[in-house]
Image: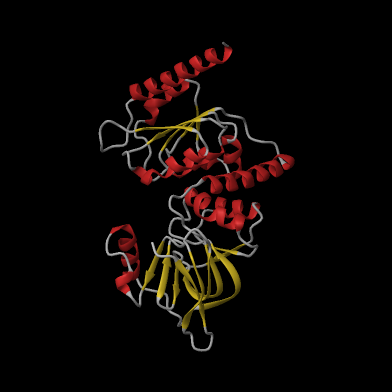
Amino acid sequence: MNPAQIFSADAKSSNFVIKGRMLPQTEALLLEDVLLDARDGLVRCKQQLWYHFQRFPWNLENPEENPKFGEHSRQVRLRISQGLPQDHGSNFLPGSYHLGISPHIDSYYHLITDLLPHLILGRPKPVLIPKWIPEAFKVFLQGCGFETKELGEDIFRVERLELPPMPNPDWNPVKFRLVQNFIQKLLEERRNRSSPPDSLEKVFLSRRHARRRHLVNEDELLPILKQHGFQVLIAEEHDVVEQIQIFSQVTHLIAPHGAGLVNGMFAKPGARILEIRPVISSGDYCFDDLFQCGKFHHEVLVPKKRGRFLLDPELLDDTLRRWEQTETSLRRFACV
């Protein structure tokens, strides 16, 4: 992907010109005098667009430079068909801000993966968030010490706006340690103010309340999970910091593929994590890189039949018995 550019605008002429050096997508992008659609975070800088933070840049003036096929092309072309932000009638926002609006910012995975690392590294300034962001996410950001500014579904002309980077892959060891160290300090502050939630070591993270990717036969799996010492956790029943506190004590985690699985990065070192995917390519393998950074024992189970998302109880039981046998062997070896 072509590197992004820093742009500025002449306030009198509204002509956008290239201001400075080229920046790779692994760095934050600082823009001046831009139009922002607060419904989904689309940013327009004259004839340049950015969508999903920096993931999908688009050149309106020289369309031949844009991707012709693939997700990048589909996402931006669809968004353009819905209309682009225009200066007429826009609301002016003076000052400098971080962009915290994207189509997927209501997903916990994208909050932790895309936005949080950028804010940790960035200079202190307000974070623009959409009014539709989950209240728990807003509370989390504010509890981390980040100032937030909530925007309604309107068009804004922003004096200075900083866009989070969107590296590929999502995770690398440096980014992993950055987030873990920040969260560790946050947990220490939380422990000084309140008692931690009950400690759980073996957790099955349920998605029974999720709109999609919930195991149809979850109730059928519960007796097997209980037999192997697992307790059911419903993430939505806890605020973000409480979730992280719980996962910081986890040694074994089982979960259907979904945003909440990102909490696995806060588990005990060497934790075993079993990800249940509807199909092998779910999420473009986003958790593979994450758990490799943390050196967790990450495995994937996929139902034998495609269609309804259900898991053969025998397949789950066989996997957990294998885990137990492996751990028993390791303990015996350690005693020799």
| Scheme of colours in the image | secondary structure
Q: Quadrant of residue 63?
A: bottom left
Q: Quadrant of the C terminus?
A: top right
What residue sits 47% from the left and 22% below the top?
Answer: 226
Q: Quadrant of residue 222?
A: top left
Q: Inspect this view and state whether residue 154 appears.
A: no
Q: Residue furthest bottom?
A: 12
Q: Position of residue 112 (x, y in %)?
A: 53, 49
Q: Position of residue 283 (x, y in %)?
A: 38, 46
What residue sits 46% from the left and 84% below the top?
Answer: 15
What residue sits 30% from the left and 61% below the top?
Answer: 74
Q: Residue furthest front?
A: 21
Q: How many marks?
A: 0
Q: Inspect this view and state whether residue 69 appears.
A: yes
Is 13 placed above or below 267 here? below
* Residue nearer the viewer, 194 or 41: 41
What residue sits 25% from the left and 33% below the top?
Answer: 305
Q: Position of residue 263 (x, y in %)?
A: 52, 40
Q: Residue furthest right?
A: 192
User: In the image, is 269 to the left or to the right of 309?
Assistant: right
Q: Position of residue 1 (x, y in %)?
A: 38, 61
* Residue nearer the viewer, 263 or 73: 73
User: In the image, is 152 to the left or to the right of 311?
Assistant: right
Is 93 placed above or below 181 here? below
Q: Quadrant of residue 128?
A: bottom right
Is 215 placed above or below 90 here? above
